[in-house]
Image (tube, rainbow, N blue to C red):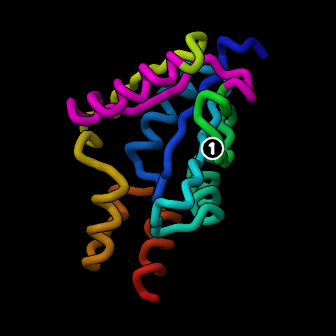
């Protein structure tokens, strides 16, 4: 497989949302292989542990043949190098996302100028959607099935029943 056709899409994915999936579908239509990289950060408190986040992403994305869900505890650029990716996909919903992502993209380019960051815009119906909003709605007992895949909605419901 040609390196030019491999991309990674890193994130915490706590939980994976329909907005994430929209960006992943777009990336999968551009690249022959997309690694969805579940970032493992022991300092970050998450609703779902790393096993759960990986499982939910894997189930939610199993219909896309050229997408593989993996975990990583190393720098994004290092992971990209390991799998031969030359592109890092980032979803941008708003100007505030761009400012943050722009700084990270510049640092990644400094670390490895051969790995490029590509910003993909989700469908406009997902521009307000993020994992934090989903978790907050669920905490208050709201139905989040409109915003996440069915398996994720069910697991969220079970989490907040505990």
State the residue position of label 1.
63
Q: Residue at x 36, y 30 (%)?
A: 101
Q: Residue at x 41, y 48 (%)?
A: 18
Q: Please, what secondary structure does the residue beneath circle 1 have?
A: loop
Residue 138 location (% of width, % of height) = 32, 72
Q: Residue at x 32, y 58 (%)?
A: 132
Residue sitting nearer the eye, 70 or 127 = 70
Range shown magenta:
81-110
125 versus 140 height, above or below? above
1 versus 130 height, above or below? above
Residue 84 is covered by the magenta coloring: yes
Residue 49 is covered by the magenta coloring: no
User: Is 105 positioned to the left or the right of 79 in the image?
Assistant: left
Q: Quadrant of residue 36?
A: top right
Extreme residue toward the right, this view: 1
Mark 1: give few (<14), some (14-19) or many (20+) Cα within 10 Å: few
């Amino acid at each position: 497989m040609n390196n030019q056709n491999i991309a990674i899409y890193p994130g915490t994915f706590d939980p994976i949302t329909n907005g994430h999936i929209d960006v992943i579908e777009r990336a999968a239509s551009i690249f022959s292989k997309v690694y969805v990289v579940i970032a493992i950060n022991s300092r970050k408190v998450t609703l779902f542990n790393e096993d759960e986040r990986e499982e939910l992403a894997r189930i939610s994305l199993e219909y896309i043949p050229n997408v593989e869900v993996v975990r990583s505890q190393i720098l994004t650029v290092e992971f990209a190098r390991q799998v031969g990716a030359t592109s890092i996909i980032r979803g941008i919903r708003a100007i505030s996302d761009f400012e943050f992502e722009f700084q990270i993209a510049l640092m990644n380019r400094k670390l490895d100028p051969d790995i490029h960051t590509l910003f993909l815009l989700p469908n406009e119906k997902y521009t307000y959607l993020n994992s934090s909003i989903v978790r907050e709605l669920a905490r208050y007992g709201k139905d989040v099935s409109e915003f996440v895949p069915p398996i994720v909605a069910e697991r969220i419901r079970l989490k907040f029943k505990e």
